[in-house]
Image (cartoon, helix red, strand yellow):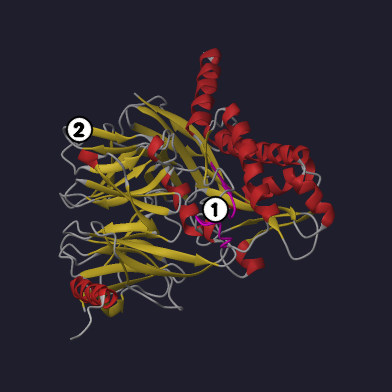
Amino acid sequence: MVKYNFSLHILVILLIFNILDLVAQPKFQLVDILNISSSTNQFSKPIFSQDSKKILVTGVNKRGLYLLDFENNVLALTEEDRAGVDFKWTKNGNIEYIVKNERYELVKKKIVLHKELKDNGLDTFVYIDSKTLKIHFTNTINDFEIPTELGMFYNAHISPNKKMVAVNSCSDIFIIDIYNSAKPINLGFGIVSGWSPDNKYILSFEDISTDGRNIINSDLYLIDVQTKMKYRLTDTNHVMEMWASFSPDGKKIVFCDDQSGQIFISTINLK
Amino acid sequence: MKNYLLIFLFLSSIFLCQSQVVVIDPGHGYGVNGENKDGRTEAEITTNCEVGLKLEKLLKAVGYTTYLTRNHSGNGSWVSVTQRATMADSWGADRLLSIHCNGGGGTGTETFFCERNTANRKTDSLFAKKVQEKMALIGVWKSRRYVEDFLYLKFHLGVLSGVATGCLNEIGFVDTQSDLQKLLDDGWRNKFAQAYLEAIKENLASSADIYLATQVSDFQLFPNPNFGTFSISTIQGGKCKVVIKSLQGTVLKTLFLQQSIHVSVFLDLPKGIYIAELLQSDKIQTKLMVVQ
């Protein structure tokens, strides 16, 4: 008769759980990476248009807004100094950006200043008050704010369903549930750059420096906001991948190389 | 009428001071578990922060909105280079001062600025020059250089990649005994903070002076106040660019004028005070415009 081995039993159970866990974990892979920008211009923080036919970008120093198509054409929308810090497409196909608590909308290259930060038929949005550093979520009905006691927040991104915000504080990324904001959930180190359309994942990047002055590398990551699992998307030494965002259908991502200012599109596949 | 103008200018200068944001970036720090990720000395990590904290107090006392990228030197104080630049962007920084200490042998202070895609602006180099001058004078340092980062270092400083006018100052050398003694001395740290304060104040004031320019200029804007329709005339004529901005510096309209010395402009602007900048032959002249 075989003697019961408790340790072996535990080991087998752990092994089974581990295998199941590995099977359950989705693996992501970037394929068909395509450079869509010409070598003469340098851009940053790319965002797909709603029809995925154009890419909205800012300059490498976050100045101005430009529209790229896939045939090396560049359309300058505004040369505004701070337009590239916090900008996005609106639901009516225009572009809006926030400059020091002021909300601007680009309508056919004309800049409209929205005196009221609250929704004027525009999308719900999130911004950080430059005078208080409180995070504000504003829509037609509500104006929520997250107090600074919870952190010195920066770089806020609202989820597509308008229920969560991914935001940085110190060196980490946090998720805040707007309607149940008991305590921000810490997702660890990185810089958040966008949400998946299904609200399940955020895209982030991690810049690397060995001396605290010169950035020598950067790579992209995908983080599951529920499980906090982090998946590495790129592992290159020659490209400083930063500021990735999803296409509206969630099948592609667009990102920039911070060193060259080039813009890349890639299909994101489940392995 | 002149008194009203003076009161208006005084109130405007207060408004500009309060609305201007200064982000202080004490370099480096320690990771969550005490890791020294940037491989810097304790002397540098603490000096950067202590001088930054002293500067924060001085700036707040003057009335500037001031933030630090890190406010202690303990575990968890480290943030990445891009995170520092992103903080400054996100917080609407008008000026970013990154505080570091030098190494590798030598003595004195030096300041770097970045002109990646902004070579024609010169705002960063003017700020760096002012910081360098004040540190040499008030900090009593040998002035080594103020220089564009890529020209000297062969790379762009990541912390200066944001939109704010910024520079990085290396106070002194942590591996030169005479420099190190000054860096660790509280009295000298007060002087370094004072030097930064003077530099930031003077640099921001020169910008504010542009906004509030009252000197005779080579262009006229009339009527002023107006209802959004006004005329611009230049004395010399020739090609020029007119930029209409909000008081926060947001560009609302850019007009390119050809040859003409007089042009009428119609703008659909809400009531308020705006800045009109005329750029011609590398000269920038500015007027305040009131839309009723």
Looking at numbered disc 2 in the image, what kind of residue is underneath it? Asn
Which residue lies at the image location 43% right of the left edge and 30% below the top edge? B289
Quote the CA–CA distance across marks 1 and 2: 41 Å
Chain letter of disc 2 in the image: A
Q: What residue appears at the point 44 percent right and 52 percent down from the top-left corner?
A: B86
Which residue occupies the foreground of this view, B184 or B107? B184
Q: What is the span of residues highlighted in magenta in the rendered image? A: B23-37
Give neighbour class at mark 1: few <14, some 14-19, many 20+ (Cα, 10 Å).
few
Side (left or right) of B285 relative to B184: left
Q: Which mark is residue B121?
A: 1
Same subunit, tags 1 and 2: no
Against A48, residue B219 (above or below) is: above
**Quarter containing the C terminus of chain B:** top left
Q: Nearer the viewer, residue B60 or B8?
A: B60
Task: Look at discs 1 and 2 and give the one toward the viewer.
Answer: 2
Residue A121, how many percent across, how many down? 15, 39
Q: Chain of mark 1?
A: B
Q: Which mark is residue A142?
A: 2
A109 displayed left or right of B237: left
Callout 1 secondary element: loop
Residue B255 visible from this viewpoint = yes
Left or right, residue B249 beside residue B43: left
Residue A256 in percent (x, y) is at 37, 68
Q: Residue furthest front?
A: A1
Q: Is residue B25 magenta?
A: yes
In the rendered image, which quarter is residue A37 located in?
A: bottom left
Name the chief secondary structure element in magenta. loop
**How many neighbours does mark 2 have within 10 angstroms: few (below 14), some (14-19), or many (20 or more)?**
few
